[in-house]
Amino acid sequence: MPAQIKIFTLSTCSHCTQAKHYLEEREIPYDSVSVDFMSGDDRTRVLETLRQLNPAITFPTIVIGDTVIVGFRRDEIDDALRKCDGGAGLQGSTWQQP
């Protein structure tokens, strides 16, 4: 079963964009939450969730299965994907930073 992946991002964050591109190039589905586009109670709830995952509330915060990764860290993302689903989509990885 593929890992459930959620990425908490800011629209102006280059590391957030790189993390999303990294997954997209591998055709790995994820849910993205753009925190800076939220307001009111929705934003408050997301920030409370984010604070539990990453008390510093830095971006991107990536959740893969039970693993929380703070920042765009390719090796940690790959390790978490392998742990969750055997590395589906990681074969032949040739990603290069844009």
Image (spheres, rainbow, N blue to C red):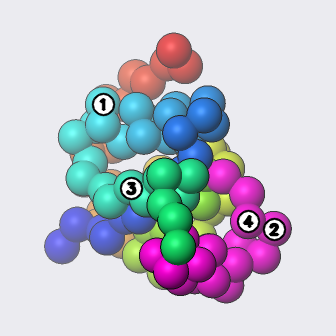
| First-in-chain label (2 vs 1) | 1
Identify the element where label 4 is drawn: loop
Outermost residue, top direction? 98
Identify the element where label 2 is drawn: loop
Residue 90: name its quadrant.
top left
Q: Amino acid at mark 4?
A: Ile
| First-in-chain label (3 vs 1) | 1
Q: Are discs 2 and 4 less than 8 Å apart at CB?
A: yes
| Label 1 environment density (alpha carbons within 10 Å; few <14, some 14–19, many ≥20) | few
Residue at image mark 3: 32
Q: From what the image shows, is residue 73 above or below residue 55?
A: above
What is the spatial separation of the Cα atoms under label 2 and label 1, in whole angstroms? 29 Å
Q: Amino acid at mark 3?
A: Ser
Q: Is residue 86 visible?
A: yes
What is the spatial separation of the Cα atoms under label 2 and label 4, in whole angstroms? 4 Å
Residue at image mark 1: 25
Residue 57, label in figure: 4
**Residue in view at x 41 percent, y 64 percent:** 6
Q: Amino acid at mark 2?
A: Ala
